[in-house]
Image (cartoon, helix red, strand yellow):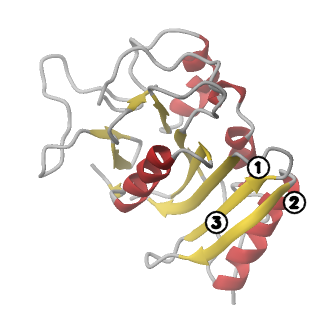
Amino acid sequence: MNTMHRHAWLPVTLSMILCAACSSSAPPPSTPVAAAATAPPAQGSPPPTDAAGARRIQGRDYSVPLPPGFVSVGDPSTPGELRAQLQPLLDQGAVALFSEKTPPGWFRGSVVVTPVDGDVPTGAEACKGQAAEVARMTKSKLLEARLMASGGCRWAVQDGERETRGAIGAVMKGTGGHWVVTCNLDTRDDASRAACEEVLAGWRAGR
């Protein structure tokens, strides 16, 4: 039987889709880093990388690749209001990545990983139902809802009032629990869409 916690990951997903800091008017983090979200490498140690040498960002019990053109908010040296806004999530082991450059008037691309508090959809119908709830609560158009090969639920929505704003989300598994990856993007922004796909494809439970 399909089981799910009705609002287990909806609130954090909503908060990131509607995040004011994701607009193009908000300054991005100033320093590209590859440090962990909650536990940066020891002083003098090299940034974490994968076998191909690509930089990775470490969350609480998972890591993700740092796509080209994106920076991490998780480094302690990142200044400003943006880090302060996201600090409560970073303290929980979350990761937040933002596009360095955004054309004027475009929605700034971001990838935010937040913890799930409760159960997750475990079947196709439960996935569709939860995705439909995300769309309803955000007054968005549901574009996609399906199970991935990993068994996690993936969805995509488009803003009901501003058709150039969209989001892609997916439930991913760490070594100690589940996480929601929310990619906020301008629908014209192919680079941010590719970055989202890179993070999802490069997800790694553990370190």
Which label was assigned to residue 136? 2
- State the residue position of label 1: 163
Establish if 103 lies above or below 66. above
Residue 103 located left or right of residue 175: right
Number of marks in the rendered image: 3
Q: Where is residue 175 drawn, in percent x and y?
A: 39, 59
Identified by mark 1, the residue type is Glu
Establish if 177 lies above or below 84. below
Residue 5 shows in the view = no
| Location of residue 201 (image quadrant) | bottom left
Residue 155 located left or right of residue 71: right
| Location of residue 143 (image quadrant) | bottom right
Question: Judging from the image, what secondary structure is the residue with disc 3 in?
Answer: strand
Q: Residues within 10 Å of mark 2 (few under 14, many from 20)?
A: few
Q: Residues within 10 Å of mark 3 (few under 14, many from 20)?
A: many
Identified by mark 2, the residue type is Arg
